[in-house]
Amino acid sequence: MNKTSKSLFTAVLIAVLGISTMVSVAVESPALVAKERLGKLIFFDTDLSLNGNQSCASCHGPGAGWAGDLSEVNAHGAVYEGSIPGAFGDRKPPSSAYATFSPIFHMDKKGLFVGGNFSDGRATGEKLGNPAADQAQGPFLNPVEQALATPSDVVTKVCAASSYGDLFKQVWGAEACDSGNVNMAYDAIALSIAAYEASPEVNSFTSKWDYSLKGAAKLTKLEQRGFALFQGKGQCKSCHLSSGKNALFTDFSYDNLGLPKNPENPVYGNNPSFIDSGLGGFLASRSDYAAFAEANKGKHKVPTLRNVDLRPSSDFVKAFGHNGYFKTLEGIVHFYNTRDVLPACPGDYTEAEALAANCWPAPEVPENVNTAELGNLGLSPAEEAAIVAFLKTLSDGYIPIK
């Protein structure tokens, strides 16, 4: 199915099902309050794009753990085409689930940057007091995403051309759609999306792991072993915090894992010398943070591991890493374990090519690579497999056996 056909199919499905296209998410979604319902309608509205073919959900599909839901795209460049044909960004879509827990971007007491949204932290939350809301305003006006020209274009579509204009005014006031209140309305649109992303429908905490903490499910011995390795020898908990009820499996910090560049990333078609500086690139754009840019070059936000394996079918390909280099959990766990042990590949190998040749390509950004917590973990193949088994317990939508 091509992208246009998929969009039409999705639009029909949304209309029929009342936009409840949640694959493998909670069987009975909790009721949404008015602001959350409004945010959901905006989140799934493809009309909020230049060519009426892209919504937030186009890159953050619930069936794929609120990340990219096109298997054929994930299997290669992993970067999604925008509303304009041939327009691409340079990173894979991160999961929008559990992103609302990220704090406002700041430097902590250890001198580490924490919080914000987007892989490089540029949606700081400083504007709207909410990083998820700051992030929500970006794609509408990004020429390689939804590609609308101005906030006014977005507001007009919501207020005058959508089926939920009355709900928007009900939630934000009758004056929200007045011509003189465009900026206020644009902020309200973003805050509505963030409200939906913070709702129990998106952040449902319904994985096998969650149910095991309540005594409603029991991890297998392999999964239990994987968790023990996750906490210990694998050093995963250093960044993917797993303690306490409703653990988020991230500390919202930034790290350079030494990931290779994804040779199939479409960005190289127009810019062969492209290097993703991540957090360092964002810091360099700010006079108040520029002095910290070099020390953070190549670092990207530590993602939540919740829903890391959630997919609509067993043969569906997911992409992992900020650039989508990895296509399998087995591959990325093996990389964490052996990055600094295996020889360097003699070129820009894909994950499959690297695994076949038993090598790893050089890091895309060699500066600031984390060598303390990964790269030479000494895990056996059986231990790697156990960690993968544990990661698969983090998918929402698990149904306990009664």
Image (spheres, grey):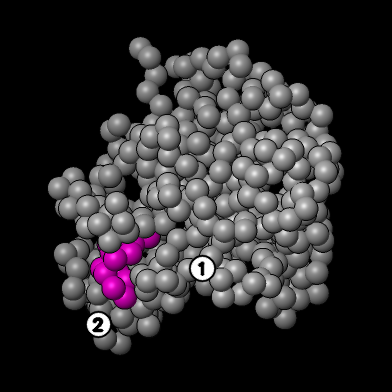
| Magenta stretch bounds | 42-56
Magenta stretch: includes residue 197: no
Residue type, label 2:
Asp
Which numbered dot is residue 378? none
Mark 2 or 1, closer to the camera: 1
Quadrant of residue 119 in the image?
bottom right
Q: Is residue 331 left or right of residue 340?
A: left
**59 left or right, relative to 254:** left
Which SS does the magenta portion mostly show? loop
Residue linked to disc 2: 178
Q: In the depicted view, which residue is nearer to us: 383 or 121? A: 383
Report the residue at 38% width, 34% height from top: 313
Dot 2 or dot 1: first in sequence order is 1
Tell me the crowding category of disc 2: few under 14, some 14 to 19, or many 20 or more residues within 10 angstroms, Cα based: few
Q: Which residue is mark 1?
A: 89
Taking the image as shown, residue 94 lies to the left or right of residue 54, namely right
